[in-house]
Image: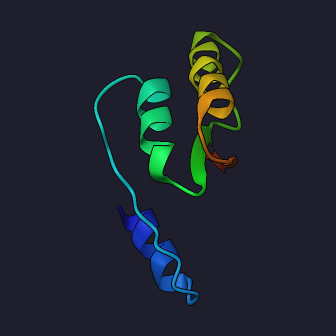
Amino acid sequence: ESAAESIARSTDNGLPISWSASPGSPARVLTEESASASLLVVGLHQDADASVGDADHDVAHWLHHTITHAPCPVVVVPVLA
């Protein structure tokens, strides 16, 4: 919520920015929620010291699904933890 508010405050071009939190699998929720969006921006948290493991595989699965099935363009923004 605070990230969406910060972006909205820093944007002076009148672009509508919204956020939501929904239960369910990330792949399904993001794909469904992006149906009415012009652009889907996904923040991907990455720990700079983390090693590759099962968690990375799970993230790769829903991220790939979202990128290939979303009806709008998808931008993935890496966020270092």
Name the one closer to the observer, 6 or 73.
73
Q: Can residue 81 be spotted in the picture? A: no
| Residue 3 percent coordinates (x, y) | 45, 64
| Residue 53 percent coordinates (x, y) | 65, 12
In the image: residue 46, left or right of residue 14: right
Q: Can residue 39 be spotted in the picture? A: yes
Residue farthest toward the left in the current orientation of the protein: 23
> What residue sits 59% from the left and 23% below the top?
59
Residue farthest toward the top in the current orientation of the protein: 54
Colouring method of the image = rainbow
In the rendered image of this protein, does residue 50 appear above or below residue 61? below
> What residue sits 61% from the left and 17% below the top?
61
| Residue 2 percent coordinates (x, y) | 38, 66
In the rendered image of this protein, does residue 80 appear above or below residue 70? below
| Residue 55 percent coordinates (x, y) | 56, 17
> What residue sits 58% from the left and 47% below the top?
43
> What residue sits 48% from the left and 44% below the top?
35
Name the one closer to the observer, 81 or 79.
79
Quadrant of the frame with the N terminus: bottom left
How many numbered discs sit on the rendered protein?
0
Name the one closer to the observer, 28 or 76.
28
In the rendered image of this protein, does residue 56 appear above or below residue 36? above
Quadrant of the frame with the C terminus: top right
